[in-house]
Image (cartoon, helix red, strand yellow):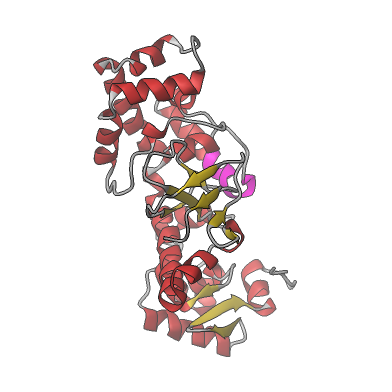
Amino acid sequence: MALTLHLLQNRQAALVFDPWRREVRAAIARAGLEETVAALIRLCPFAAYFPDFLTPAPGTTDLETGIDRVLSTPAARIGREIARLYGPGRIPCGARRLAAGDTGALARLGEGLRRYYTVAVKPYLAAIGSAVSADRPVRAEAALTAGTDGLLASYGPDLSWRGERVLEAPYPVRWELPLGGRPLTMIPAFFCVRFPVALADPRLPPVLVHPVTPLPGWLERHRAGERGDGAGPGPVGHLVGHTRAAVLDALERPLTTTQLGAVLRLALSTASRHATVLREAGLISSERRGPSVVHRRTGLGDALMNGAVGGRSTTVALSGGAG
């Protein structure tokens, strides 16, 4: 929810998220949530700092548990973080009540979060789940084949080593987070774009939220899937079969067989079989990379999906060791 509030305040990843922004803003208006969302944005601005208590510790598995953790934050901590957000003597009236631990203000915050969730997050859970499901096997495979170094390398340019004990990530401000022997939890996030995100308070359990930003057109595909016609994109589905058309659609970017199965919720053997048929038809190419096979659309596959012949070019410092 915090990351979606940020996306409503900026134009980052416009091609990917502008359709979502338009849909969510319309839903906010229909639900009469303009004032509620405005209040949440004031508490969670797209800025160098927003309160950590809004993003409770990892391990939260459902909305109510998460909200309960937010509302159970000690009043002293809420007050300290809100004071940091607004600056001394500049806290607005409503935020002052929240900072003081007022039960009414906390209840309104909880209700506001619930209502906002129903329009900004809940309708997109299937798309979020597919993106995270596609990311997880990539990390697991990297960790199993090459250990911690392989896992960290799988994040590509998002993470790099400086020396032997400092891990660097792109970040809006220069900042160092000493791990001090503590584990670092990596959290994939659908609505995270451009930069990973870390908690501001170095005393909290270290986490690094990293982007699993979807491809452009994800919302249209998501809606098509809800209608039941997303398994095969238009006439292509009638030509090659709905599931194989879905495989071709997913291969707008290269994916391993494991990722294909996760994205389309297919058994590994089924994903492999469809990839073989498409490869034999010249619509995709496959290349073995270590224990994995990476599939990508060929120019012919692009032409079939896009209706035209044409090629496509493919192309925070955390210190304390990898522990």
In front here: 284 or 170?
170
Q: Position of residue 112 (x, y in %)?
A: 35, 26
Classify residue 140 as left or right of residue 298: left
| Vertical order, 150 against 48 (above or below) | below
- Residue 258, can we see it? yes
User: What residue is shown at x 37% (from left), y 52% (from top)?
Assistant: 182
Q: Quadrant of the C terminus?
A: bottom left
Q: Quadrant of residue 243?
A: bottom left
- Residue 231, can we see it? no
In front here: 76 or 142?
76
User: What residue is shown at x 56% (from left), y 78% (from top)?
Assistant: 295
| Vertical order, 217 against 257 (above or below) | above
User: What residue is shown at x 56% (from left), y 71% (from top)?
Assistant: 251
Q: Position of residue 144 (x, y in %)?
A: 40, 75
| Vertical order, 22 against 286 (above or below) | above
Point out the stretch of residues depicted in magenta.
13-21
Count the numbered circles shown: 0
* Residue 15 is covered by the magenta coloring: yes
| Vertical order, 128 against 21 (above or below) | below
Q: Position of residue 100 (x, y in %)?
A: 32, 15
Q: Quadrant of residue 259?
A: bottom left
User: Which residue is situated farthest in the bottom direction here?
Assistant: 280
